[in-house]
Image: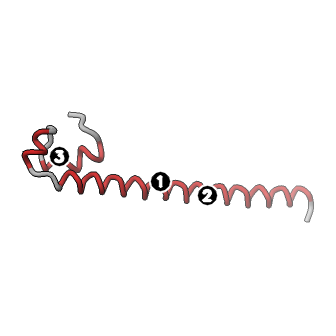
Amino acid sequence: MGSIASQYTTSVIGSFFQALMNLIANSYHNSKEAIHIARAERELRMLDDRMLADIGLSRSEITHVVRHGNSR
């Protein structure tokens, strides 16, 4: 294999593995974030309505607040 073809092949393989590693890292990050969101929602849903009112939330706002913050 010639020098140019060898460099091209190495570059393509390197690019492929870099893209694969980015995909794996992003998937891990997204999975971890989804777990944190689910845990936060579950914990807030375990509170009674009075406790939610004390922190300024209604039960119907839980999902929105956990995912987007409390910007009203």
Alpha carbon distance from label 1 to label 3: 25 Å
Q: Name the residue rendered at 23%, 46% in the picture.
A: 64
Q: Secondary structure at mark 1?
A: helix
Q: Residues within 10 Å of mark 3 (few under 14, many from 20)?
A: few
Residue type, label 1 = His
Q: Name the residue rendered at 42%, 56% in the picture.
A: 32
Image colouring: secondary structure
Decide: marks 3, 2 in contact (CB < 8 A)?
no
Residue type, label 3 = Glu
Q: Name the residue rendered at 24%, 37% in the picture.
A: 70
Task: Locate residue 27 relative to residue 58 in the image: left or right.
Answer: right
Which residue appears farthest toward the left when viewing the image? 50
Residue occupied by mark 3: 61
* Quadrant assignment for the N terminus: bottom right
Q: Quadrant of residue 68?
A: top left
Q: Secondary structure at mark 2?
A: helix
Which residue appears farthest toward the top when viewing the image? 72
Depth order, front residue of 35/63? 35
Residue 45: horizontal and vertical position, in percent? 18, 54
Task: Locate residue 62 relative to residue 7 in the image: left or right.
Answer: left
Alpha carbon distance from label 2 to label 1: 12 Å
Decide: marks 2, 1 in contact (CB < 8 A)?
no
Residue occupied by mark 1: 29
Which residue appears farthest toward the bottom when viewing the image? 1
Q: Residues within 10 Å of mark 2 (few under 14, many from 20)?
A: few
Residue 55: horizontal and vertical position, in percent? 16, 39
Residue 21: mark: 2
Residue 52: mark: none
Residue type, label 2 = Met
* Quadrant assignment for the C terminus: top left
Task: Locate residue 37 relative to residue 52 in the image: left or right.
Answer: right
